Amino acid sequence: MTDSSGLPRRSFLGIAAGTAAALLAPRAARAADAPSAPAASAAGDAGPVVYDNWPGKEAWEQLRHAVGNRLMKPTQPWARLKPGRIPKRLFNPWYLEEQPGATQSTGMYKAWSSTASEYAVAAERGEDIVAAVDFARKNRVRVVVKGTGHDYYGRSCGPRKSLLIWTHNMRSITIHKSFVPQGAPAGTPPVHAVTTTAGNRWLEAYTRASQSGLYVQGGGCTSVGACGGFALGGGFGSFSKRFGSGAAGVLEITVVLASGKIVVANAYQHADLFWAMRGGGGGTFGVVTHMTLLAHKEPSISGWIGGPITAKSDDAFRELIQRYVEFAGNTLSDPTWGEGVILNTDYGMADTFDRGLNVMQVGTTFLDITTDAARSVWEEFLAPLRSRPEDYTVNVDFSSQPFRNRWHPTTKEAIFDDRRNAPMGYFWWKGNASEVAAYWGAYDGRGVPWSMTQGSKARTLAQGLFDASRTSLILWQTNKALYGEHPEAKERDLTTSINPAVFDNVAFITVGAWKQGKYPGIAGHEPVKAESQAQFDGVMSASAHVHRVTPGGGSYSNEGNYFQDNWQQEFWGSNYARLLKIKQKYDPTNMFTVHKGVGSEGW
Ligand SMILES: Cc1cc2nc3c(=O)[nH]c(=O)nc-3n(C[C@H](O)[C@H](O)[C@H](O)COP(=O)(O)OP(=O)(O)OC[C@H]3O[C@@H](n4cnc5c(N)ncnc54)[C@H](O)[C@@H]3O)c2cc1C
């Protein structure tokens, strides 16, 4: 994964069950408060409710009637692929999002494969969602919620015997010049805000906000949802050190609960649910129809520092990593900077790891300072490297533009949706392109405590990253960790349920490997097991090294390990016990259950 300007952005992770899992996921203090959570029966006495029933045709026809004929049978757009060429549209994220039977990733080795639900409600209004939820509850049918299908764990697709609530067609955006949450006491100061609906994507929110001189804090990838799993799970974009997490920006949420009731949650009403839904994870507490986001005055300058630094020996590369982590800890942890560096980019789609590339690819954003100012800050890091041409080749460039131009990029940075009927101006960053239709060998994400960049610990951290870089791409992003966050943003972040470890972390590391255009179950396009296994082994080995040097760093439920052990603690830390109580209050029968989501223990 990459970010807004071409920096591969993502993480990866997964550990397999058993030995690899133990390696990768050292058991930090097991969540003392991570009770198992069997779903209560609706009556409260007849054992857990199981959502695996499948009613007859008549019931489905009643649902069709209730949702104004918006009940459909999704199919996978790659289901009829013949061996050979893959059509270009299957690498277009906007096309995939228009398909109720598609997801952005096609699966993950040993973990999941993209599957289309047998039925989908193509919701257009909150009432459609209420009808679908009522149907699922009464008939005990497994329900799945999908906005964009970006989830790395496949939590927005299948199984086949399930009812999908597909929100793609709910796409309207409202700009507010003076928004006050419902139920707020008289005198509450109004703020600028943007209301998104469940099918909106970040590009739509950014461009509409920008037309009013505003900015909302979303993700780097333009096609991730602006009213779904991103903010519900936390959500970090390039400028999160300045504006906070996606969750921190949410002012109000309208949600259909498992009971079928629609409620508006904010700081003044259903405050417990509001807290839980800002970080506690998508597909867990209900189905969101609207989210209102705090809008900021649009920044003026968006800058980019990019290019490779190549080390000419292993020792020089180890030293380079140490110099960088010290620089990141001491200088890049303030709100000016975002994104970071990638070690060995070419390992992302490799299936053999025998070279030790020794390349650090810089891909860092800066905000509201001039290019010269950014260059002068970076001299501290770059000048000593340039002065040693026998050890390093430095090809790092600095550039900047008016911030609003981000949403009107050139073909150098972005790929435009050029389908005949495509909406004008829809694009995705080149850095995200290789992730469309990705089949993951493995993936893991891990926070890095700031303290590991200080004193002698920086050497230990650098050694761990060097060891990890022998078998995997390593993505280091400072914007997915909140140490050094702007105080005003921190105040908001502290009111969310995101993992508290993030406040002590200087960066978030992703390790991962994938193949593009592999489709499990489709003859001629199947993932090659040996390649996936090699990717898996490489990532697992790297991940174990990263875990070894990041004690207490925790992880992030949207970008963690599918096989994460002790996930309650690793994803939510001390917030888990409270999250579970709120889950049990609002969804006592666990109608909304997702892989490694709050309350999914007994699943
Ligand atoms: C290419 C790529 C780039 C990414 N970049 C970033 C990034 O920069 N920063 C970051 O923090 N994360 C990033 N992510 C991870 C992303 O935050 C998660 O995948 C997120 O869950 C996506 O949410 P979605 O609604 O778009 O996707 P979906 O797959 O549709 O949904 C994800 C989860 O949310 C649930 N959900 C969706 N809509 C609703 C709703 N209306 N109500 C309730 N639950 C809902 C689904 O059931 C599912 O569990 C990226 C992922 C990809 C594939």
Image (cartoon, helix red, strand yellow):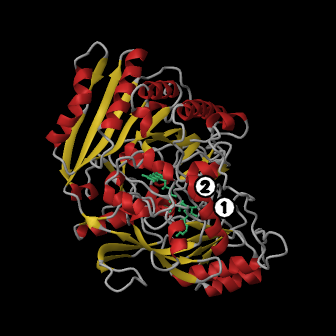
Q: Is residue 470 left or right of residue 336?
A: right
The kind of residue on which mark 2 rests is: Gly
Which residue position is annotated with label 2?
Answer: 154
Question: Residue drawn 65% across and 81% down?
Answer: 259
Q: Residue 230: percent from the left, percent from the top?
A: 47, 60
Up/down of 155 relative to 547, above or below: below
Q: Are marks 2 and 1 in contact (CB under 8 Å)?
A: yes
Up/down of 433 relative to 354, above or below: below
- Find residue 379 and report its image quarter: top left
**Quadrant including the N terminus:** top left
- Find residue 327 and report its image quarter: top left
Question: Residue drawn 46% across and 60% down?
Answer: 95
Q: How many marks?
A: 2
Q: Residue 285: percent from the left, percent from the top?
A: 59, 69
Q: Nearer the viewer, residue 507 or 261?
A: 507
Question: Residue drawn 37% across and 64% down?
Answer: 422
Badge number at residue 158: 1
